[in-house]
Amino acid sequence: MRTALLQSSGRPGSTAENLKVLDDAAGRAAAAGAGLLVAPEMFLTGYAIGDDIARLAEPADGAAADTVAGIAARHGLAVAYGYPERDGDTVHNSAQLISPDGSRLANYRKTHLFGGFERDHFTPGEQPVVQAELNGLTIGIIICYDVEFPENVRAHALAGTDLLLVPTAQMHPFQFVAESLVPVRAFENQMYVAYVNRVGHEGEFEFVGLSTLVGPDGIARARAGRSEELALADVDPVFLAASREANPYLHDRRPGLYGSLL
């Protein structure tokens, strides 16, 4: 399945403009043969927008989700995107996957909040593994800081995730996560990982780009630079199966030794 990574910060503070950016990217991705488009963390509203996070937050089935569903159906590809999700009085840093027919496949709430900014504006989620089936692949979703906890990604590996989507707001000086940590996560857990970042300055943050799709061999199939970009690469289930057969990590685990980790 060809997968498109939308490296962009969109137009912070304007959901309407970000939906236009997403629509344009979906058209370009579909024209390039992509079956899935992945946008960054908090793409629909912007990340560093302070109290506007709460003002712009919508339910998972809100008006913005309906618009994304229309975009997905019109272009005939699945769309994953980050957004602030309102659930009553709480707001979550969430990511949702919409199918090519416009139906909602999965919604994930970030479980590990990074820094005071996120803890001030969001409530953490409590469900570590969220999955959906798409084009014969098991798709998992986590968000940014979550991938830096090996337990999160290993939980997805044990649950059978083939392609892990990681909408991200990765900032300077932590670019080593995109460059080094994400390939290791893909290799040690035998899965594809799509790590899709924001880019440029936004408020107090400088987002570093470097979005990547990494295979289970730890090798990047696509690697964006430091500017807005639509990167494309293929997820190959045949290669994934062969890699899993050859790599012994998951087979050689000894869970009985790991009780102290709890």
Image (tube, helix red, strand yellow):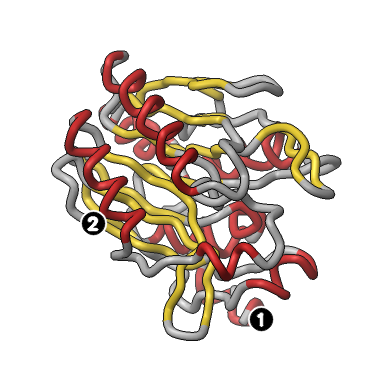
Residue 84 visible in image: yes
Nearer to us of marks 1 and 2 is 2
Q: Where is residue 22 in the image (x, y as percent from the top left)?
A: 41, 34
Q: Distance between the residues labelled 1 and 2?
A: 38 Å
Q: In this view, does 29 lie above or below 85?
A: above
Location of residue 73 by image quarter: top left
Q: Which residue lies furthest to the top in this view?
A: 32
Report x, y in % for residue 227.
Answer: 67, 22
Classed neighbour count for the residue bearing mark 1: other residues with Cα under 10 Å, few (<14), some (14–19), many (≥20): few
Q: Neighbour class for label 2 at 10 Å: few (<14), some, many (≥20)?
A: many
* Residue drawn at (84%, 49%) of the image: 204
The C terminus - image quarter: bottom right
Residue 221 location (% of width, % of height)? 49, 21
Q: Can residue 138 be seen in this view?
A: no
Query: For the residue marked with disc 2, what is the amino acid?
Result: Arg
* Residue at 24% from the left image edge and 47% from the top image edge: 69
Is label 1 in a helix, a strand or a loop?
helix
Mark drawn on residue 91: none
Q: Which mark is residue 260?
A: 1
Depicted 61 relative to depicted 18: above or below: below
Contact between labelled residues 2 and 1, with CB atoms less than 8 Å apart: no
Location of residue 59 by image quarter: bottom left
Quadrant of residue 234 within the rendered picture: top left
Q: Which of marks 1 and 2 is nearer the N terminus?
A: 2
Q: Is residue 254 left or right of residue 96?
A: right
Residue under label 2, please give it. Answer: 104
Does 158 sit left or right of 255 as displayed? left
Towards the viewer: 199 or 2: 199
Q: Is mark 2 on a helix, strand or loop?
A: strand
* Residue 233 or residue 184, whichever sits in front: 233
Q: What residue type is labelled 1?
A: Ser
For the point 45% across and 31% down, which residue is it? 21
